[in-house]
Amino acid sequence: MIYSPKSISNAVQILQDDPDAQILSGGTDFMVEVNFGHRAPTSVLSLRAIKELCTWSQQDGVIRIGSALPYAQMETGPLAKLLPALAQAARTVGSPQIRAAGTLGGNLGTSSPAGDSLPVLYALDATIIIATATGERRMAVKDFMVGPKRNALSKGEIITAVELPASTGYQGYSKVGVRNAMVISIASACLVHNPIDRSVRLAMGTVGPTIIRASAAEKWLGEECDLASASSITPAICAEFGRRCGDESQPITDHRSTAEYRRHAVSVITSRLLERCAAS
Amino acid sequence: MSQMIKVAITVNGQHTTAMVEPRTLLVQYLRDNLNLTATNVGCDTSSCGACTVHLNGEAVKSCTILAVQADGENVTTVEGLANGNEMHPMQQAFMANHGLQCGYCTPGMVMAAISLVKDIPNPTEEDVRIGLEGNLCRCTGYHNIVQSVLAYAEGK
Amino acid sequence: MSVKTRTRRDILGTSALRPDAVPKVQGKFAFSSDLWAENMLWGATLRSPHAYARIVSIDTTAAWKIDGVECVLTHEDVPGKPTYGLIASDQPVLARDFVRYMGEPVVLVAGDHPETCRRALAAIKVEYEVLEPLVDPEKSIDLSVPPIHPDGNLIRRQQIIRGDQSLIGEVVVEGNYELGMQDQAFLGTEAALALPDPGGTGVELYVATQWLHEDRGQIAACLNLPEDKVRLVLGGVGGAFGAREDISLQVHSCLLALRTSRPVKMQYSRQESFFGHVHRHPARIWMRHHATKDGRLLRVEARVVMDGGAYASTSSAVLINAVTHVQGPYKCEHATVDGYAVRTNNPPCGAMRGFGVVQACFAHEGQMDKLALACGISPVDIRLINAMETGDRLITGQTILNSAPVAQCIRETAEIPMPPNMTNDTDVLAIPGGSGLTATPSKIRRGIGWGVSIKNLMYSEGFDDFSTARCTVEDGRVSLKFATSEVGQGFVTLAPQIARTVLGLDEVFIETIDTGIGSAGSTSASRQTWMSGGAVNGACKLVATNIIAEVAKMRGLDPSTLQIQGTDIVDLSGNAVESVVAATKGKRFSETYEFHHQPTGELDENGQGDCHTAFAFVAHRAVVDVDPDLGLVKVVQIATAQDVGRVLNPLSLLGQVEGGIAQGLGLAVMEEIIVENGRVRNPSFTDYLLPTALDAPDVIARYVEVPDPYAPLGAKGVGEPPCISVTPAIVAAIRDATGVDLLRVPVRPQDICL
């Protein structure tokens, strides 16, 4: 069976009636599993026709992005100006065809630590909005992902949106891959500077079972510098910050890279992100 | 076999319909149900782009879409580009500039190229390379392909 | 009457368009994967999940019971020879007592739908006794483990001993080099359609292959059919690069078709394709070069170990190519070389573009750079000082008789302008790390590196890889018949160019490419322009002679006073007697020609002998930008001058050069099949990384045209050289940028920065 509901409430109702229906957003992860015969869905719930999932809005300093909005729409345009780090992350997703299909909801639903957008959501302390049978629940993204390809979504629930704060300080994203484009992350990171609450938040991807916030490095940085501005961040501080971020990573060795390289690479890119912040 | 679902998709301007399994990919629908075999499959991981078609005018990899998701939509494949006996100018550009060798990537490459020039009417070489990053070619090293697309854009 | 002077289109030397470009851009070209027949079944293969195991039992009962399953076959069902192979027949059609690599075929099924087949495969129970795989090639050499195959663990050893074995140079450099396993990664996976003859007396196979006649011989033997009962037709080929030289699904699809008396189609998925064909040999090469203090190469010592994987394929020939090319395109009098191709439980390896020379070249070019450094001269000068010339002897004792413009290739490459330096405006996608925004531009370092190579053309060691072509002219139209596999390289473009040029006729058709004529040999070893080009040229010339004879007879002229010029038959003063179209009106001429290259010989136990047919040369200069802290590389520009003999089709040639360079770039910085304890870890295009349009560098190509006296058209094969020395050039450039002594490809980020 294929369901193409036009509203969220409809979609939730469908999941009540057919709890095994596979929720499908852009399909870029899911189809690979179909191709390999790992999945043979008998019923599919497509989110494509639910208009409100494919839009974004801004209100009271909060940007709300529908879970089925394709990455192509985050790459450029007004949303990219509001969330430059997300735009940078979106640009690294697959290829143009994949960016036209892939979504935040898909990255969250799959919950791979290599999900390109996830470090941005972590660094911005995103809130995940989930439609349930009884209404809606909200949870912090850090509580959402619980392990590699595991998350807190229950049966019958649908990720509907992600809420992110509009921020005025520097934010940047970086991802290491062996190819210049269309490549799965070996290590990635997002850094967000908030001059108002004098903080820098740093999240790392592909270097642990989930996205990792470099909380200790963030705290150390806050103690070293007055983060009301980025001007007091010196090159030496950037290097030490990177080293500390590396210490907080928990990478593994697999066929894509080694734990040693991942730790090293994440140190380099986190240090460089802080340099960019200082220069901004 | 699981339950079959009826889909109706407009392909190259023709109304088509078939009963398919829910798991049927759009590319399988095109190749197996409609016998439109121009659209090739080169991988199973949405990597190679050989299966690129237009869905409502946008380039998509037809291996990342279920046939049922295209129900009621418009799909164009490379078979639908020609105007009668006259090839689409992008097809002519690939031919004239040796933008192909074995030709396996060509249908997807042509569809991706048309989509990119639609979005960027006067692309630079870099724009073309970015627009084709999702389409692998193992024969040409891409240069003659890039030249083909630039020649098309200039000749429009 | 004066000769018409219109410029003729699409003759030799022009960028004639591919005749198959029209169907290919329209999607009407039938690739093997597009084939379909009424009442057709699908075939599928159950493969070994283990690198090495004893088969205890195979139970296919449950698979037979599945609705839609028509046939389940094991080794017991192979009616003829139980094994196949290109040089040694050592690979089971279906595994019998042992599986020797992960992915080895064990059981075949035919069913009414691919999904039926998938379920049937899942229902088959194979009990294995898993054994410890042999994965270290050195253990195959030192005989420390029992043989994993009745033919033993050593496939071939070849030494080359020449000159003074105790010579020590004033300057001595040495290095240990290593290459990972590269995949050909053609885009159209293996596919075939087998059509059984009524009564099972024969079979017709439409298949994507590089060598129809060789396939036919191997298939017929396994099916226990006479060769004339096995007919092969070339199905549309989606790239090859060596991976279609061996049998993959050919015997399997025929077996299923004959057993079920129905057409059977087989097609591999990308994942299965990684297990379904041989790869480029991983190699470990030690070299020690001896030179005078001013950089003249005196002696090369080398030890070459190539991992052939579980079955021999072409390993013995790949080894010979490697050991006979260790000197590179350089004069060298003394040599001590020891080479081994061995069997392991790793995936089988065989032909891939460059065929053993890629491995040797990576090592000898690394050595030349070390030598340059040790002697205090530039990488260009060290290569110029030693550049080989016509008349020089190889370390095998063979004299180079071909044109050998090595120095000219180097000089012309050096003259190509350098790319502009990176600036603050440089697009982020053009710097290392690309869209990942990893780079800080001030930290990027640029490097320049060189690679020069020699490559043998055609087959070696006494093999007569002739080619056959038939030319028929009727009513002013030419039709050409040959069995030359068109895999994308463009022989279907070249053959009509030859016919137009020789015969003065514009309309040329190519008949079906099949086994209905003599062999053309393989589309490999950069040989078809020379060999099948020679055959087409020969057949067309015979027909031209017949046409002239006919005209002479009709007009009472001496045929020796006539020749074809442009589209006319002209006399000694150049006056047109008649157009060729008019002369062939209502007449038919047909001739078949077999082209053989000059014979070659065997190597003796000291590796001495005239074993190769001909040689081509090329130089590459790579410019790279490197992020040394992250180990990420962007190849900025490849400059190249290639010894091509004569340019026959400029755009087609450029396509070969640029395509080959992209493959060499892949080996340099990203492509590797990762095998751990016999298990392939990355059989997908997600994790086996091919260069994209954004990874392909700017290529500036020059052609050195010194017509080869032995080449029928003066032109050398151009397919392999582009991908050979570009790999060491890129690695040399990375070394130049970083100062890291990189000795292994692909270069991984951690090799640079950790």
Image: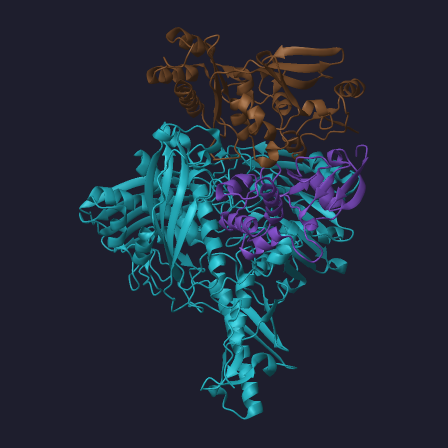
Chain colours: A brown, B purple, C cyan
Point out residue B153 in the picture as x, y percentages from the top left corner.
56, 48
Query: In the figure, is residue A5 to the left or right of A208?
Result: right
Question: Which residue occupies the foreground of this view, C543 or B125?
Answer: B125
Point out residue C319 in the picture as x, y percentages from the top left corner.
41, 50
Vertical relation: C319 (above or below) C563: above
Vertical relation: C434 (above or below) C320: above
Residue found at the far top of this picture: A223
Q: What residue is drawn where x is 68% and y is 27%?
A: A25
Tell me, yes or no, if residue C111 can be seen here: no
Query: In the figure, is residue C605 to the left or right of C676?
Result: left
In the rendered image, which quarter contains the N terminus of chain A?
top right
Question: Which residue occupies the foreground of this view, B54 or C237?
Answer: B54
Tell me, yes or no, if residue C497 can be seen here: yes
In the rendered image, which quarter contains the C terminus of chain A?
top left
Point out residue C623 in the picture as x, y percentages from the top left corner.
36, 42
Query: In the figure, is residue C104 to the left or right of C40?
Result: left
Question: Which residue occupies the foreground of this view, C742 or C488?
Answer: C488
Query: In the figure, is residue C231 to the left or right of C575?
Result: right
Question: Which residue occupies the foreground of this view, C484 or B26?
Answer: B26
